[in-house]
Amino acid sequence: MPIYDYQCKKCGHRFEQLVKAGETPDCPKCGAKEPERFFPFSAKVSTPTTRERGLKVARAKYGAQKKEKDHAHQEYMRKEMAEHGGG
């Protein structure tokens, strides 16, 4: 069940509510029906700037993971060579 942000059309009270699909809660302050639903403040808008920023973060994270994997592979190969007299 998602959490939505609402604002009452009658008294102006803003609130968050966990709701089932297709349901609309009553205002908890005045009991009015059909409050206006808003996008949550955490909702992100995709723009070229935000996409580029996300790509930079993803590339940096991937680069760090790759470096760690490469290091682990080199250590493994070193141990294998040492155990089998290859080095």
Image: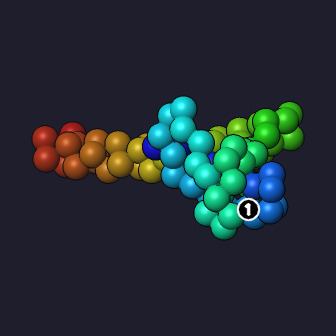
Give the left or right position of residue 45, taking residue 24 as reference: right
Q: Is residue 69 or residue 61 the one in the foreground?
A: 61
On the question of residue 54 being in view, the answer is yes
Question: Residue sitting at 27 percent across and 46 percent down?
Answer: 76
On the question of residue 57 being in view, the answer is no
Give the left or right position of residue 82, taking residue 34 as reference: left
By what rule are the colours in the image chosen?
A: rainbow
Residue 29, position as x, y percentages in the image: 66, 67
Note whether 32 is above or below 23 in the view shown.
Answer: below
| Residue occupied by mark 1 | 14
Residue 48, position as x, y percentages in the image: 86, 34
Residue with the most extreme bottom position? 29
Counting other residues with Cα less than 10 Å from the Cα at mark 1, is it few (<14), some (14-19), or many (20 or more)?
some
Give the SS element for disc 1.
strand
Question: Residue sitting at 22 percent across and 49 percent down?
Answer: 79
Question: What amino acid is at disc 1?
Answer: Arg
Question: Residue sitting at 69 percent across and 54 percent down?
Answer: 32
Question: Residue sitting at 75 percent across and 45 percent down?
Answer: 36
Q: Quadrant of the C terminus?
A: top left
Give the left or right position of residue 43, taking residue 22 as reference: right
Note whether 48 is above or below 44 in the view shown.
Answer: above
Q: Is residue 63 or residue 78 the one in the foreground?
A: 63
